[in-house]
Amino acid sequence: MLAEGTTAPEFELANQDGEPVALSDFEDQHVVVYFYPRADTPGCTKEACDFRDNWDRYADADVPVLGVSDDPVEDLADFHEKYDLPFDLLSDDGGEVATAYESYGEREIQGDLLSVTSRNTYVVGPDGAIAAAFEGVDPEGHADEVLAAIE
């Protein structure tokens, strides 16, 4: 995990519509960047829907949320539409951004050693530094925990 106070690595990734989204698009405001292993799986769906269900609170606080996984854009588009998510999902094909955020590595899944995105969340402050970091999060109730760190 990147430590609080560390400058957040800049990135630009395609969202669920294939449009580029960069961290620098959100200068001078807090932004939540959450990393998750795979779209439309139980834990990842629970986490995304938790952010969705708390979206009004994030919007009122003017805090954008960006979900990042190594899923292809097409899978993100399906996931985004299926669960009516009000925030961007970003495709980090190859895990370069997750690696820069120390949120990518090998994990054994069903007996196979696979490279996957870890379930970590960062709050990037208006100054571009990591304001809060959450490692290996529990997807249920996580949106409340993140918003509390911002408030």
Image (cartoon, helix red, strand yellow):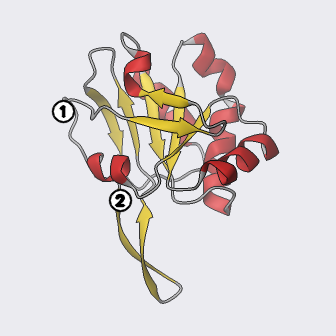
Against 63, residue 117 (above or below) is below
The quarter of the picture where residue 41 lies is bottom right
**Number of numbered discs:** 2
Query: Who's the residue at 71% across and 35% down the image?
Result: 85
**88 left or right, relative to 7:** right
Q: Residues within 10 Å of mark 2 (few under 14, many from 20)?
A: many
Query: Who's the residue at 45% across and 54% down the image?
Result: 119
Q: Is residue 151 visible?
A: no
Q: Residues within 10 Å of mark 1 (few under 14, many from 20)?
A: few
The quarter of the picture where residue 22 lies is top left
Q: State how far apart marks 2 and 1 are (Cα).
A: 18 Å
Question: Residue 134 in the image: x percent, y percent?
Answer: 37, 44
- Tell me whether circle 2 and circle 1 mark residues in contact (CB < 8 Å): no
The quarter of the picture where residue 3 lies is top left
Against 138, residue 57 (above or below) is above
Mark 2: amino acid? Tyr
Question: Residue 138 in the image: x percent, y percent?
Answer: 51, 53
Question: Of 62 and 13, which appears nearest the observer?
Answer: 13
Question: Residue 115 in the image: x percent, y percent?
Answer: 40, 70
Mark sitting on residue 6: 1
Mark sitting on residue 104: 2
Question: Residue 58 in the image: x percent, y percent?
Answer: 58, 21
Give the SS element for disc 2.
strand
